[in-house]
Structure formats: C-alpha cells, structure tokens
Image (spheres, rainbow, N blue to C red):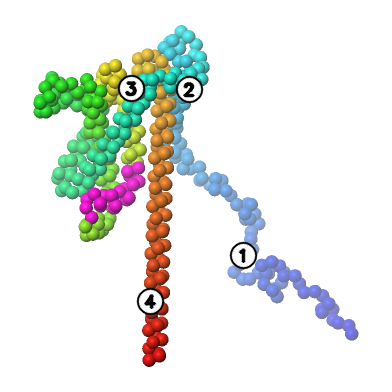
Amino acid sequence: MTQPADALTPPPAVAPGAAPGRPDGARRPGRRAPAAGRGPSARRGPGTRPGAWTPWLYLAPALVVLAGLLVYPVYELGLISFLDYTQAQVSGGRPTSFRGLGNYADLFGDGQFWQVLVATVLFAAACVVCTLLVGCAFAVLLTRVRAVPRLALMLAALGAWATPAVTGSTVWMFLFDPDFGPVDKVLGLGDHSWTYGRYSAFTLVLLEVVWCSFPFVMVTVYAGIRAVPGEILEAAALDGASQWRTWRSVLAPVLRPILVVVTIQSVIWDFKVFTQIYVMTGGGGIAGQNLVLNVYAYQKAFASSQYGLGSAIGVVMLLILLAVTLIYLRLLRRQEGREETRQETRQGSRQEIRQETRQGIRQKSRQDIRRGEER
C-alpha cells in the first residue's frame, strides 16, 4: 500500500524557545525576540557607560590639592633621606650625592635616637590614654547636667581647643612659673622649677597637651552618646546596671567606630607633638632630656643642617604611625569578628533551645491526648 505524501514528510523542526505545534520561529505571545547586538558581549562595562567619569571630575580639584600638599612632600621627604644633603648642597657649594641607606645606618647607629624613640612612644601613649579618659568622662558628664551648665562647659572646652598651641604653652608656662606662677604659691612649693627635671617637664607638657586635645574627644563622644536610643539606656537602668557597667556593656560597643577614629587621631597628633615640647622645655630641655622625635628631627635638620638625616627621621616616624594604625585596625576587626561569632553562636543556641522546647511541648501534648483516648 502506498502512503500519502503528507505522511512521508517529517514534521517541522521546533525552534528553541518555540512551543510545540507552532511554526518555526514562532514564540509565545508576550515574549520578545532578542534584539541584534544586545547580547552579553555587546553590553557596556561599568566604566564605559555615559557619566561614569563625572564623580572623578568633581573630585579632581580636591585630589590635585591633596596630591600637592601630601603626596609630593612625602615624595620629597623620602628622596632627601637617601641623599647627602647639607647646607653646602643647599647653597650650591657642593653637588648633591646619593648615599642610599647611609642616613638610616647613621640614624639607627645613634644611641640617642633610640632613647628619644622610647621617650616619644611612652609620652604619646600617656597623652592618648589621658586624653581619651578625660574626654570620655566629660562627654558622660555633659549628658548628666542641664542645658546652661552644659553650654558653659562646651564653650570653655571649645575655647581650649581653639587656642593656638604657642599661646596655650605660654599660658601654662606662666601658671607654673617658679617666680610669678600661681600654682607654686597655691601648692606651697616656693620657687620650684617644673621644667628643670625631666619627668616634671614631661608631666607639664602632658597636662597642656591633654588640655588642648580632650575637647575633640569630648564633643565627638558626646555626639555619639546622644545618637544612642534612649530605650537602651532606660533598659540598662531598669536592670540595675551601674554607670561603669552601662558604659562598658552598652555605650562602648555602640561607640566603638567613634572611639576608633578619635584614638587614631590622638595617636597621630600626640606622636608628632612639637610646639609644646619646643616652647615649654626650650627646645628639648637640659642636654636634650625632653626630646621627642619631632624636635629631634628639627635639631638634626635645621640646627645641624643635616637635612638628609632629618628626613630619615621623618620617614621613620611616618612608617611607625602607619604600622601602629594598621595593627590597631586589624586588632579591632579581629575583635569584631569574634563578637559576631559569639552572637551567632548565642542565636544558634537560642534557636536550638526553642526547637527543643517546642518538641517537648508537642510530645507532651501527644502523650496527654493518648492518655485521654485510653481513658
């Protein structure tokens, strides 16, 4: 028997995406065919879309200023630290020669440098700790007093913060002057000279540094405390938490980002103190007993005209500050990661307890139902 021609011909191939029984290329209504040139390869990257460079154009003036004020001086500082650059080279009497690491070798071989470095680290650490303690204490005090005392305290602190370092150092020198200062008269110390001894001079400078630095910490931490929801503090008070417990368990975790910023700023400012030491100790004290790295670099660069050695001291200070900042941030991140892990563990344990409680309640209800049916 012969079959009809229609039965011998194969059915039309169904195109991908087309429904069975539809002609080739036919698609379901409501779906559009992909337009030519709109595939993944023809899409534009994020950097090629129109207006992608507009933010950088707005930032360009500020970046140029920062490059001129920060990047270029650091570049020159590092370059001079590798050169034999003294007053003879500045005046043009002798050509500038490349020393390589010679300035750093002379610096690290100088015993006075290590003494000054240790004194700088200890002095900066004491200033940072005292500044943070005083600033945080006054910030908490501002939340406890009324509007008028708060305003008066704010104005007094901001006045100390706005006072130039030279002016503040001169005022503190007058207050502790052995002949005319009121502090010695009130304390009954006679003509005691605070700047003669090494530790008393450092203590005097520390008081002045804390006096002009704590307002920044106070205002910043106070703003952070005001941003904390009042319900949290009220709940802590209802639970019977003391002031120290509230600060350590409630405020400190919330204010951690702010404390990180003020701590890093305080480390940078206090590590490179210059004006207070130079003015109050007369350039570093008797026989350089109150030298810090900034004053030591000034003496080497400008008093001794060893600009290469002074630049090497500046590079060492920069590297120390960068290392301290990076280590501090890394430790904080580790601590935050541990706390997040603890919170996740606590949440997981709470969920497990809830599930076990629910299962126990269900089993108990089933047992009660079975007992009722048996009865």
Q: Seen in the image, is 368 located left or right of residue 50? A: left
Distance of label 4 from label 2 (alpha carbons): 76 Å
Q: Nearer the viewer, residue 332 or 273?
A: 332
Rendered image quadrant of residue 259:
top left
Q: Secondary structure at mark 2?
A: helix
Q: Amino acid at mark 1?
A: Arg
Q: Amino acid at mark 3?
A: Val
| Image quarter in which the N terminus is found | bottom right
Q: Earlier in the sequence, mark 4 or mark 1?
A: 1
Res 234 visible: no
Question: Mark on residue 79?
Answer: 2
Distance of label 2 from label 3 (alpha carbons): 21 Å
Q: Which residues are magenta?
A: 241-260
Judging by the rendered image, the residue that carries numbered circle 4 is: 361
Distance of label 4 from label 1 (alpha carbons): 55 Å
Pair 3/4: label in front: 4
Question: Mark on residue 295?
Answer: 3
| Image quarter in which the C terminus is found | bottom left
Judging by the rendered image, the residue that carries numbered circle 1 is: 32
Q: Earlier in the sequence, mark 2 or mark 3?
A: 2
Is 28 a magenta residue?
no
Pair 4/1: label in front: 4
Against 65, residue 84 (above or below) is above
Is 253 a magenta residue?
yes
Against 41, residue 288 (above or below) is above
> Residue drawn 19% across and 26% down?
172
Residue density around tag 2, few if under 14, some if 14–19, many if 20 or more, within 10 Å: some
Q: Earlier in the sequence, mark 2 or mark 1?
A: 1
Is the stretch drawn in magenta largely helix, strand or loop? helix
> Residue drawn 28% across and 24% down?
277
Q: Amino acid at mark 4?
A: Ile
